[in-house]
Image (cartoon, rainbow, N blue to C red):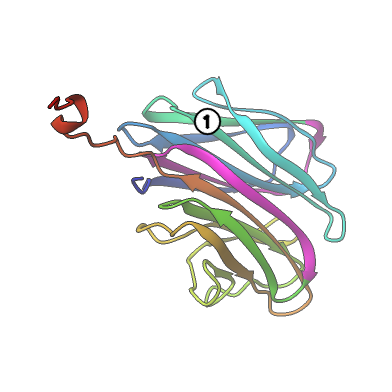
Amino acid sequence: MAVPTIGNVTYNNQNPNGTSITISGHSQNSGSDRLLVVTVTAMNTANITSMTFGGVGLTKIHGTNRNGIGQRMEMWYLSNPNSGSGNIVINYNPGQFNPIGFCARSFTNSGGIGNFILNGASGTPRNANITVSDDSLIMMTSCAYNVIPSTNGQQIPTGTNRTFTAQNTYRQVANGAISQSSGHSAGSIPLRAVATSGSISLDAVEILGISSSPTTDDADFFMILE
């Protein structure tokens, strides 16, 4: 396998007015086996009906209501998006007037989406495991009532702190945490999300590497007869 290459990222936090928001100018890296992954956190009254990048529709990985913290959290992806700059449009119904937090991250050299986990809000720290293949990356997001500290709020794997962007959707959101560029070995990877107090959720998705081309030897094609 080959580890995916981490590309450009766009963060946004908007107060919408109506039934869609447009995030202008996300830049998809050029290269082979491109992938775009988008995470969205909004009030749980929001029903996200579709999402596009450059006019091309994304596919939903998951969408779930976190009723305990009143938020809806979703992940979407697009395989082989066009490279270059484009707008991301998020459509929802009914209309929303509450803040929406958003993160779009691009990859190249990716085999697409692997496993994902959904863990609703529970007391801090929130621990979970995700099973991954060799050379995969992990992308993680969390939501809490209280502050998610930048020092240790997102740990991939547990004990290793990752950077993220803090957003406010009337809740505290940790968006865009990503594992090391060297990738993980196959197996169960422990994750941890931390808030200063109270409950915190933990969602994560596996970004697959791509299979290496098999090597062959000339001897594979010959039989020696005696």
Q: Residue at x 74, y 41 (%)?
A: 63
Residue nearest the viewer, comparing 15 with 223 = 223
Position of residue 187 in the picture relative to residue 69 (left or right) = left
Among the 4 quarters of the image, the one containing residue 106: top left
For residue 103: magenta? Answer: yes
For residue 99: magenta? Answer: yes
Image quarter of the N terminus: top left
Residue 170 seen anywhere in this rendered image of the structure: no
Q: Is the residue 108 above or below the residue 118 in the image?
A: above
Position of residue 211 in the picture relative to residue 221 (left or right) = right
Image position, residue 135 (x, y; %): 40, 52
Image position, residue 111 (x, y; %): 44, 37
Residue nearest the viewer, comparing 62 with 51 = 62
Q: Is the residue 96 above or below the residue 123 in the image?
A: above
Q: Residue at x 41, y 44 (%)?
A: 209
| Disc 1 target residue | 78
Judged by its main secondary structure, the magenta piece is strand
Magenta stretch: give its range. 93-122
Secondary structure under tag 1 reads: strand
Q: Residues within 10 Å of mark 1 (few under 14, many from 20)?
A: many
Residue farthest along the top direction in this orientation:
55
Q: Is the residue 34 above or below the residue 187 in the image?
A: above
Image position, residue 83 (x, y; %): 36, 28
Q: Residue at x 21, y 34 (%)?
A: 216
Residue 52 seen anywhere in this rendered image of the structure: yes
Which amino acid, by three-letter code, is at mark 1?
A: Leu
Q: Residue at x 45, y 35 (%)?
A: 35
Residue nearest the viewer, comparing 4 with 173 = 4
